[in-house]
Amino acid sequence: MTFTLVAPQHPIADVPGLDREADPAAQALARARVRRRIGLVPAFVLLTVLAFVSIFPVYWMFVTAFRPAEDTLSTNPLPGPFSLENFEYVWQTIPILGMLLNTFGMALGLAVGQLFIAILAAYGFARWSFRGQKILFLLFVGSWLVPFQVTMIPNYLLVSRMGLLNTVLGVMVPQLAAAFAVMLLKQHLESFPRELLDASDMDGRGPWRTLWEVVVPNLRPALAALGIMLFISAWNEYLWPSLIMQQGDALIQVGIRSFLGAEGNNWGAVMAASALACLPIFLIYIFLQRYVVDAFVRSGLK
């Protein structure tokens, strides 16, 4: 016995004289798609403008850094002529490699300290309910909205009395509590399965062991993303390190400031030093940007 397989045909194809392209439903769907694409045009234009506004200062920094010293103040938006004169001057004038290493150590230590304190604070806010919890959390987050200029002088006096002026530790101590980090981690911990915490309590683990043996291992992506953001924020800090550190060979922020003086401003050297200071951050963000995006997406999920 022989069987012949026949490909099934669409029922509409069997109806003679029917033009599927003229189907009203298909035409309405096509028009809806066109209108949706046209509606996205203003959004794309706005994003393009914002991207240009954000990228152009960085582009101008590198263009100025690679120009000869006599063309530093040129307003030509196109790069050229190409020169490494500014980079050679920076390398010979300041110990920029040592400054980058010191800044890396400061940013890493500050990020780790902020992350540790944020884990403890967010864990307390998310796990336990106590009287005045909401008010305390609002006050804690509200400290994030206080301008730095308001707390700058009190923090400076505190660091001075502690004998931490001109030290990296003096830069780190007043910034160890980061309200942004606590707020972000609290969102993640509130979505943490309560059953795992109850099971850990039944196994005889206390709150401390539960935090480090159950909670933290399951929050590694969020902690990695938050650590990256804290590191970048500490690296980019300028005003506070410049106020605390008076030594010219301490941090890259102070080193860049050394090219600005009463005798004149060497903008070519400033741009070259700033470009070298940006390179580590660019590399870190390029390779780890997915963790940063994932942190913001997951922070709003419950």
Image (cartoon, grey):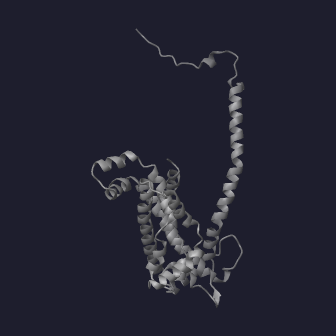
Residue 189 sits above or below residue 268 on the image? above
Quarter the N terminus occupies: top left
How many dots with numbers? 0
Query: Splitting the image into 4 quarters, where does residue 58 fall?
Result: bottom right
Residue at 31 percent across and 56 percent down: it is 206
Q: Residue furthest top?
A: 1
Q: Position of residue 242 (x, y in %)?
A: 54, 81
- Residue 126 makes an appearance in the image: yes
Which is nearer the eye, 246 or 256?
Answer: 246
Q: Position of residue 94 (x, y in %)?
A: 51, 85
Which is nearer the eye, 125 or 302?
Answer: 125
Which is nearer the eye, 57 or 16?
Answer: 57
Q: Is residue 257 left or right of residue 201?
A: right
Q: Position of residue 128 (x, y in %)?
A: 42, 54
Q: Position of residue 82 (x, y in %)?
A: 61, 75
- Residue 166 makes an appearance in the image: no
